[in-house]
Image (spheres, rainbow, N blue to C red):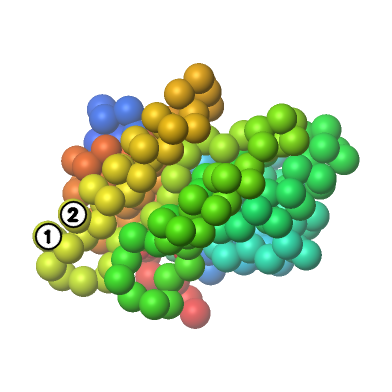
């Protein structure tokens, strides 16, 4: 059973704030995805390549799939045919591989740079120096089939709201400075993907444009 009341609430809040609600369906059944789709939800996100491929092949073509998990270059070719967005870009090689595979099937992929904002070591993402290095090497004219549309981050899993708030502010600042320095003429660069079940209201308050919400909509994942 999906949590329909929570969905309707979060959907209403997102709409009012001009935020895209992305339903994170990793480790959730096709039946639950269909139920949410039936309520009008079109954007879904997956973390694991095999699971994405299986679900995207079986579920309605109208679904807009986002890939939000850690992605290895050798898996890019499997993901590209199914997704419109990849949120987890943390190196240039990944961008180059997406460009190659997207061009081969004449598709444009929207991508977000994953920024490390949490203090925990386990989180993936670009730190200030690796982000700077990536941007120095990035030549937009080589990326005809990749649009960098924004940044993505995951806050720490802590109860202290001040810490989470500071991390969201960090991501907003990174977005603003990238926009100013590299994307001031880009219509594409506009997304700040932040906020999950625990912290989406705070994320929206701090400028999120895309929230990625799983368990609040679907219930706990069966791991
Ligand atoms: C699982 C996941 C989410 C959703 O988490 P919930 O706490 O279930 O809302 C969002 N973003 C990423 C990157 C995830 O891996």
Question: Can you tell which mark lies on residue 128?
Answer: none
Label 2 SS: helix
What is the crowding at mark 1: few (fewer than 14 residues within 10 Å), some, or many (at least 20)? few
Residues under numbered marks 2 and 1 in contact, where contact means CB atoms less than 8 Å apart: yes
Residue 17 position (above or below residue 116): above
Residue extending furthest right? 104
**Would you say the beta carbon of the disc 1 residue lies within 8 angstroms of ligand 1?**
no
Residue 51 position (above or below residue 192): below
Quadrant of the picture in which ligand 1 is shown: bottom left
User: x, y percentage for residue 28?
Assistant: 52, 64
Q: Residue at x 62, y 34 (%)?
A: 147
User: x, y percentage for residue 94?
Assistant: 68, 55
Question: Can you tell which mark lies on residue 162?
Answer: 1
Left/right of residue 94 with respect to residue 40 in the rendered view: right
**Would you say the beta carbon of the disc 2 residue lies within 8 angstroms of ligand 1?**
no
User: x, y percentage for residue 122?
Assistant: 42, 77
Q: Image quarter for residue 164?
A: bottom left
User: x, y percentage for residue 98?
Assistant: 73, 48
Quarter containing the N terminus: bottom left
Q: Residue at x 73, y 62 (%)?
A: 73
Label 1 SS: helix
| Between 151 and 10, the one nearer to me in the picture | 151
Left/right of residue 82 with respect to residue 198 in the rendered view: right
| Between 156 and 182, the one nearer to me in the picture | 182
Q: Image quarter for residue 174?
A: top left
Q: Which residue is mark 2?
A: 165
Q: Residue at x 25, y 57 (%)?
A: 167
Residue 171 visible in this rendered orientation of the protein = yes
Residue 35 visible in this rendered orientation of the protein = no
The total number of labels drawn is 2
What is the crowding at mark 2: few (fewer than 14 residues within 10 Å), some, or many (at least 20)? some
């Amino acid at each position: 059973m999906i949590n329909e009341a929570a969905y309707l609430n979060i959907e209403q809040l997102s709409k009012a704030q001009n935020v895209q609600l992305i339903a994170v369906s990793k480790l959730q059944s096709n039946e639950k995805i269909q139920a949410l789709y039936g309520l009008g939800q079109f954007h879904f996100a997956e973390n694991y390549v095999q699971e994405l491929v299986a679900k995207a092949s079986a579920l309605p073509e109208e679904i807009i799939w986002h890939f939000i998990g850690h992605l290895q270059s050798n898996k890019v070719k499997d993901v590209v045919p199914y997704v419109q967005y990849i949120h987890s870009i943390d190196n240039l090689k990944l961008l180059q591989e997406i460009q190659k595979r997207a061009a081969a099937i004449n598709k444009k992929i929207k991508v977000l740079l994953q920024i490390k904002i949490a203090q925990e070591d386990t989180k993936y993402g670009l730190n200030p120096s690796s982000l700077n290095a990536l941007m120095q090497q990035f030549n937009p004219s080589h990326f005809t089939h990749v649009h960098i549309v924004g940044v993505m981050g995951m806050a720490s899993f802590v109860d202290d709201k001040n810490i989470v708030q500071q991390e969201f502010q960090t991501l907003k600042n990174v977005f603003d400075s990238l926009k100013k320095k590299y994307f001031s003429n880009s219509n594409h660069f506009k997304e700040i993907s932040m906020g999950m079940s625990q912290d989406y209201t705070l994320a929206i308050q701090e400028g999120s444009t895309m929230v990625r919400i799983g368990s609040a909509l679907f219930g706990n994942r069966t791991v």
